[in-house]
Image (cartoon, grey):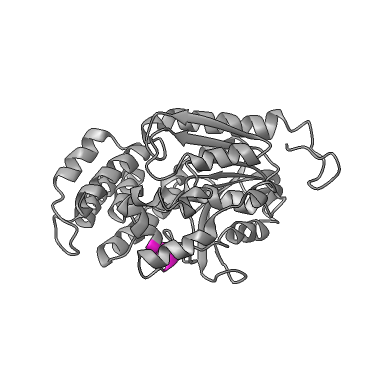
C-alpha cells in the first residue's frame, strides 16, 4: 500500500474515533490527491480548509477534529505544523467559552527535557486525579471535550499527550513513564494525586503500566490496545506493523532509520518482573483483528498481573467501530473501581497482606 492510500485508510478510523461521520470523511478524502506541502489538493491543505470552514460556522470542536486530521500522523512539515497550531488555538478559543477548563504547562527539566502542555478541569486537592492520554498520533484536543463530563463525575481531570506528540516536546524513550510521575508531582497541590487513575490509550497505556510499576500514587490503569513487550521485540511480528506506525515512532524517538528504531524499541519492553510490580487493577480493551499489537502482549498481562480484565471487540487497533461501547465499558470500570470499591481501603502497597484495590 502506498503512502497516501495508507494515510486515507487510517484517517477513516481516526475520523470515526473522533465522532466524525463516515460519509463526510469519505467526501473529504476523495478530494485529496497527494501529500505534497503547499499543494491545495494535498492532505494537510484539504483537511485544514475543512477545519477553517467549520470554524467559520462557529463549530469550533468540529474544526479541531479536522485540524487534528490535517496534522495526522505527526506535524513534520510546514502545513501540518500550521494545522497543529490551529488545532490548539481553536480549542483554546472554545474552552474560553466553557466553565472551568484550564491550560497547564510545565517543563520536564527533571527528565528528558522539553515542555508538556495539558487541558484540565475540576482541579481540587480533595478530588481524585484522572489523567487522560492518547497514543502516538492522538493530540490532547481530541479527548479534551470529555473534560466537563469527567469533572462532573467528581474527578480532577487532566488531558495531555504522549512524549513527542502535539505540544509535548519531550523525546519518546524507554523512560518516558517518568513524565507521568513528574506530572503527578506538579499537581500535588491541585488534586488528590495519591488516588490517581490513568485512562491511557494505545502507546500511552504502555507508559502508564511502566509508571504504575514504580509510582504507588497510581491506583488503577485503563487502556485500549496498549503494547507491552512483544510489539517491541518480536521479530516475526514486526513486518506486519503498518508503515505509518513505524514512521511515526521513528519521528517520536528521533531514530534515523528503521534499524535504529528497532534497536531503540527493544529497551521499551516491559519484562515479567516489572509487570509483577503492577499490583493495581488494570482494565484493557483489546481488538481481535489488531494490526499493530500482537495478542502475545495480552497473554503476558494475563500471566503476570493479579487484577486484569479484558473486553475484546471484533475490530482493528483501537476498536474505532466500537467507540461507544469502548467508552461505556471503560467509564463503568473506572467508576466501579474508584467509587464502588473505595470503602474497602487497601493496605498500603508493600505491606504484608496487601491486596490490589
Residue 103 located left or right of residue 83: right
What residue is shown at x 33% (from left), y 46% (from top)?
A: 65
Q: Position of residue 329 (x, y in %)?
A: 52, 29
What residue is shown at x 84% (from left), y 39% (from top)?
A: 353
- Asked whether residue 338 is in view, the answer is yes
Q: Is residue 168 above or below residue 56?
A: below
Farthest residue to the front: give it: 236
Residue placed most toward the observer, 278 or 189: 278
- Asked whether residue 133 is in view, the answer is no
Residue 37 located left or right of residue 335: left
Q: Position of residue 44 (x, y in %)?
A: 23, 56
Residue placed most toward the observer, 14 or 250: 250
Residue placed most toward the observer, 206 or 296: 296
Quadrant location of the C terminus in the rendered image = top right
Farthest residue to the right: give it: 352
Q: Position of residue 272 (x, y in %)?
A: 63, 48
Q: Position of residue 43 (x, y in %)?
A: 21, 54
Residue 108 within the segment the image draws in magenta:
no
Tell me how many marks there are: 0
Give the magenta part as a residue range. 250-254
- Determine the image quadrant of residue 281: top right
Magenta portion: prevailing SS class: helix
What residue is shown at x 27% (from left), y 67% (from top)?
A: 78
Residue 128 located left or right of residue 104: right
Q: Is residue 111 above or below residue 20?
A: below
Amino acid at each position: 500500500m502506498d503512502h497516501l492510500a495508507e494515510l486515507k485508510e487510517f484517517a477513516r478510523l481516526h475520523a470515526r474515533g473522533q465522532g466524525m461521520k463516515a460519509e463526510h470523511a469519505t467526501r473529504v478524502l476523495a478530494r485529496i490527491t497527494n501529500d505534497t506541502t503547499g499543494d491545495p489538493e494535498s492532505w494537510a491543505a484539504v483537511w485544514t480548509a475543512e477545519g477553517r470552514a467549520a470554524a467559520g460556522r462557529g463549530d469550533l470542536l468540529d474544526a479541531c477534529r479536522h485540524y487534528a486530521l490535517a496534522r495526522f500522523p505527526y506535524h513534520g512539515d510546514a502545513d501540518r505544523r500550521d494545522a497543529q497550531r490551529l488545532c490548539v488555538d481553536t480549542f483554546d478559543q472554545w474552552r474560553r467559552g466553557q466553565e472551568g477548563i484550564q491550560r497547564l504547562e510545565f517543563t520536564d527539566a527533571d527528565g528528558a527535557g522539553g515542555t508538556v502542555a495539558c487541558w484540565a478541569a475540576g482541579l481540587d486537592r480533595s478530588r481524585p486525579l484522572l489523567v487522560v492520554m492518547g497514543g502516538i498520533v492522538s493530540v490532547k484536543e481530541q479527548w479534551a471535550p470529555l473534560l466537563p463530563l469527567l469533572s462532573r463525575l467528581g474527578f480532577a481531570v487532566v488531558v495531555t499527550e504522549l512524549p513527542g506528540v502535539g505540544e509535548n516536546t519531550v523525546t519518546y524513550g524507554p523512560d518516558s513513564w517518568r513524565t507521568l510521575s513528574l506530572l503527578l508531582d506538579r499537581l500535588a497541590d491541585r488534586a488528590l494525586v495519591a488516588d490517581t487513575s490513568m485512562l491511557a490509550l494505545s502507546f500511552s497505556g504502555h507508559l502508564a503500566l511502566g509508571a504504575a510499576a514504580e509510582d504507588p500514587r497510581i491506583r488503577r490503569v485503563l487502556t485500549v490496545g496498549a503494547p507491552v513487550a512483544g510489539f517491541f521485540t518480536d521479530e516475526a511480528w514486526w513486518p506486519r506493523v503498518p508503515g505509518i506506525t513505524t514512521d511515526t515512532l521513528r519521528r517520536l524517538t528521533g531514530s534515523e532509520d528503521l534499524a535504529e528504531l528497532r534497536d531503540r524499541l527493544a529497551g521499551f519492553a516491559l519484562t515479567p518482573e516489572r509487570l509483577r510490580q503492577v499490583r493495581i487493577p488494570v482494565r484493557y480493551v483489546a481488538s481481535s483483528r489488531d494490526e499493530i499489537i500482537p495478542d502475545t502482549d495480552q497473554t503476558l498481562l494475563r500471566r503476570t498481573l493479579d487484577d486484569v480484565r479484558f473486553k475484546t471487540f471484533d475490530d482493528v487497533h483501537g476498536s474505532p467501530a466500537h467507540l461507544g461501547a469502548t467508552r461505556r465499558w471503560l467509564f463503568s470500570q473506572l467508576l466501579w473501581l474508584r467509587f464502588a470499591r473505595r470503602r474497602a481501603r487497601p493496605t498500603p502497597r508493600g505491606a504484608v497482606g496487601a491486596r490490589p484495590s
